[in-house]
Amino acid sequence: MAEGVIDLNGSNYEEATKTGVVLVDFWAPWCGPCKMQTPILEKVAAAVGDKAVIAKVNVDEAPDLAAKFGIRSIPTLVILKDGENKQQFVGLKQEAELVSAIEAEQ
């Protein structure tokens, strides 16, 4: 699995999320809390290693993906397992909460 945080869009989303655990951050460059979430996601990626993929979707560039999940506020973080939505969080989340949620899906 990929290390660090990867960018997803309409063309690579299905392939990246169909197997395993994936944390997807729906964000936009103009969103202040989203900018604060990114370094936290990088720490989460380091903490979980190859247990999960950590990814970001820019809602301005992939509105179809945002609509698929009913995203109304950003940041919204979604935990998927084998492509299925398992958990969803709205707002800025801390590393410990996200790591715990990912580990719960293992």
Image (cartoon, rainbow, N blue to C red):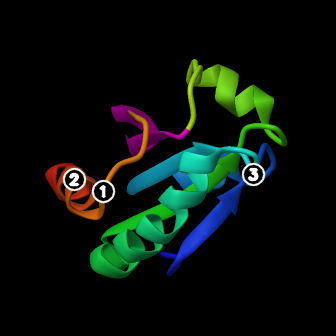
Specify the quadrant of the image occupied by residue 103: bottom left
The answer to whether the residue labelled 3 contacts the one labelled 1, judged by CB atoms less than 8 Å apart, is: no
Majority secondary structure of the magenta segment? strand
Q: For residue 39: magenta?
A: no
Q: Nearer the viewer, residue 18 or 76?
A: 76
Above or below, 58 relative to 70:
below
What residue does disc 1 label?
94
Which residue type does callout 2 highlight?
A: Glu
- Position of 73 with respect to 87 (left or right) is right
Specify the quadrant of the image occupied by residue 38: bottom right
The stretch in magenta equals 75-89
Find numbered disc 3 in the image and state the secondary structure of the residue it sits on. loop
Task: Tell me the number on the disc at residue 97.
Answer: 2
Number of callouts in the render?
Answer: 3
State the CA–CA distance, disc 3 to disc 1: 19 Å
What residue does disc 3 label?
29
Task: Tell me the number on the disc at residue 104.
Answer: none
